[in-house]
Amino acid sequence: MIKLFLIAPMKYIKGLIAAAGCLVMLSSSLQAGVKFVSPTGDDAVSAAANDIDHPWKTAAKAFTDAAAGDTVYFRAGTYEVTSTINVDGGSVHPVLLTCYGNEKVLVTGSVAGPIVEIQRQSYTVEGISFSGRGTCFRVGWDRNGSNFAVRNCSYTMKTGGDNTGFVYANGLLANGTRVENCTLIGPGSSAHQNSAGIIAFRTQQLSILHCEISEFPIAIYYKHANDIDAITHGTVIEIAHNYVHGTSRYAMEINANHANIHDNLFGLNNAGIRFNECNGAAGGDCNLFTHNTLYKTPLGLSGETDAHDRSYPGAVGNTISDNIIYGESDKEHKIFDIYRYFTQGDHKTVSDYNCLYNSVTSNVIAEFGKPYTLSAWSTHAGGDAHSVQSRPVFTNASGRLDTPADFKLTTASPGYRAASDGADMGANVDSVGVKGGGTKTPQPGTSKP
């Protein structure tokens, strides 16, 4: 009897603990759901009382007080942010913030720092316009902000600044960052030269897809190298289907390793593309750079750790294939340039099935500062056996070469159906840029049940 008496209370206590745990889970699930924010709302409204008729008022309230599983709908209007919104703490915390129906929503930031600091996991922002002085979303600054996504949004950067971007992804704490179907307009060439459309530091899992990025010093800036053995550590870096134009310093400056960079269109008025950005450890290695169209946008593999140290080169082992690299330059290194400041070295570049053309000189590739025609390069390096040195012929339907469709190849173009996979050389322009009709969040009813 004594034994039974001792066991029964223990079972009872365990039952109470389990029941308490269920109550906590139930309480958390009851708090999750649909919430609203409106310029005419009131931040004093409790989460439980929030509905379409009783919304919150500020973007800060929406970002910080949303519960796990919530969808927060922004009603039409402008939301001003005068101090950084800190979304902090917690673990997996899936939240979606989006516009209500087709209502136009603008979030403006006058703050010098980021508009929103994302340091909580699994936040998604959809269908909202933003404007600000510099960074809009800084992800994983010193706490976990993984699996952040922003899609179908727009951003206008007004002034820029050192290491600023619409999204700033910081290292492993920003793993899973995804920027998709966004239109980003920069402050122009007079801004700080590290102002970028999107900037990332060492992030191992990053996707930049279907964006249009223009008028930035740098459109896409991957700064400092991720792990050179990253491919064995779950690296997924994809930069694809983007339309970049109007850059003044670099169209892309890439120090990533093992990235898949494909089907991007670099159109009018661009600066060049550089692998190994000379800041921090050497990188820009083992990337796939395939099916991209570079119009007057030179490609360079720089191969140096910083401006004064060329003893430990980066930009090693890259595959450059199925691209169109078109130039009009009397500078012989301004088409496809490999290790210009070296006199020797094993960069291990694999290059083939490219359409290379310079309308000013016959030289289309330079290595160690020495220029080559395609045939001379093939004899020297043994690569590019299937590449062509001919002028690509674009449809140019608008007559201005300022839309992705203008860069579709005609059937008479030397790159037409000539890629290694039987497709056209260069980007698949039908898939490039912002696409309408993307993922749309289902809309709630008009009143609370």
Image (cartoon, grey):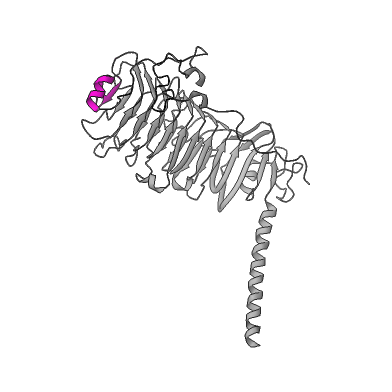
Question: Residue drawn at (54%, 45%), measured in percent from left and top?
Answer: 118
Quarter the N terminus occupies: bottom right
Horizontal side, residue 264 vs residue 56: left or right: left
Above or below for 222 versus 271: below
**Residue 367: x, y in percent?**
26, 27
Q: Is residue 328 above or below residue 165?
A: above
Instruction: Assess whether residue 380 is covered by the magenta stretch.
Output: yes
In this orientation, does residue 112 appear? Answer: no
Q: Residue furthest left?
A: 343
Instruction: Provide residue 397's location: percent of width, then percent of height.
Output: 51, 13
Q: Quadrant of residue 6?
A: bottom right
- Residue beneath the point at 50% across and 50% down: 144
Q: Nearer the viewer, residue 306 or 230?
A: 230
Question: 81 or 7: which is nearer to us?
Answer: 7
Q: Quick check: can you spot residue 175?
A: yes
Residue 205 x, y percent position in the rendering: 46, 43
Q: Quadrant of residue 440?
A: top right
Q: Residue furthest front?
A: 422
Stretch in magenta = 361-381
Q: Residue at x 55, y 40 (%)?
A: 149
In the figure, is residue 83 to the left or right of 239? right
Query: In screen coordinates, is 372 left or right of 87?
Result: left
Residue lying at the far top of the rendered structure: 399
Q: Position of residue 447 (x, y in %)?
A: 78, 42
The image shows a total of numbered marks equal to: 0
